[in-house]
Amino acid sequence: MDFSCYLKRIPTLAELATDAYHTVINVPFSKFQECGNDFIMIDNQDRCFDELFDEVELIRKMCERRFGIGADGLIVLSKHKDVDFEVTCYASDGRPASVCADGSRCVLAFGAYTGLYDEDTEAVFLTPGGTHRGSQLELGRDLYRVQLNDVDTILVYNRDHYFIRSSSLQHVTFIDSEPSARQVLEMGKTIRNSNNYRKQEAANVVFVRIIDDNTITIRTYDWRGEKEALSSGSAAVAAAIGTQLRCSAGETSINISYTAKSCTQNVITLGGELQISFTIMRPTGQINPKTIVSNISLVGPATQVYHGVFKWKLKNYKCYQV
């Protein structure tokens, strides 16, 4: 592991206080949140931490809520020669995770904070899932817009149940009244263990209530933690798409007659409000036309909570003699 970049010059704020004579280092971090989903953000512009986060135990310790910093995940931003920056994301258990609807606004906010791109321009960043774009909606406001990948996996069981892959698989189901927290857990577990669910890979269960033509509320059962999530960008996207399919289908049919339609949906979550825009297309003249959703964008808040350093004892590290 090469920490020589700290020894060539006086460390900047992003390179806080690594002592090359000891195996204990200070890992600088910032904590950001978006509608209650919180992430530990790491500035790796000098690539000094390329190997550090291979240690799964470090990520787990940092994300642990009672004995660490506490976060839903850890995200590393590094320079890249072809785009503004590269993004690597880990779940709180240390496993590699995708970066898309969830965490992407924190990526944009932290990227501007660290100077990886000008906040008055559009950022282009690379993730394991492909290249994404996003920008601050308005200077001085903590609102960000991120462009998401197309959605072409939509399975319709009936007018009230849809499986939609928006970054990850979501089971969208429609309800008439706002559920209690206990009902979300009970119904989420019941649906997850149903026969239809078992035919699919693991998915969140998203309960959708339609308020008016432009607004829905969602409650999301997170299958990973077996608990309710404050917010989920992927769930919000799936809910918005499912709402459009349901409302366009009429009372008795799920067939859609239009070829293309632009939609905007306000989505209210427990953690805050999001706005989802997209174009939905279903070719006509086919017996079983495939629905494709493109031009997907998500607008929502992202803010910095605090920054600091996390002390970590390196294993099998040979100290520099300077």
Image (spheres, helix red, strand yellow):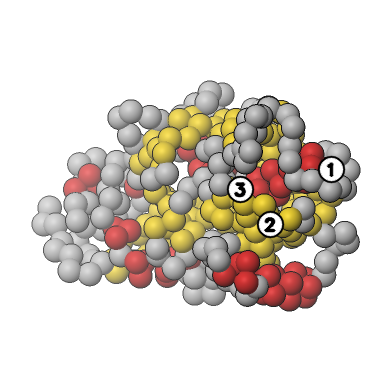
Q: Residue at x 61, y 48 (%)?
A: 154
Residue 269 image position (x, y, % from top left): 74, 53
Quadrant in which the N terminus is drawn: bottom left
CB within 8 Å, label 2 to label 3: no
Classify residue 90 as left or right of residue 144: left
Residue 321 image position (x, y, % from top left): 11, 57
- Identity, as a three-letter code, of the amino acid under mark 1: Gly
Classify residue 81 as left or right of residue 147: left
Label 1 belongs to which residue?
A: 250
- Identity, as a three-letter code, of the amino acid under mark 2: Tyr
Label 1 CA crowd tier, 10 Å (few <14, some 14–19, many 20+): few
Label 2 belongs to which residue?
A: 157
Label 3 belongs to which residue?
A: 154
Q: Residue at x 65, y 29 (%)?
A: 285
Report helix, strand or loop for mark 1.
Answer: loop
Residue 4 image position (x, y, % from top left): 19, 48
Report helix, strand or loop for mark 3.
Answer: strand
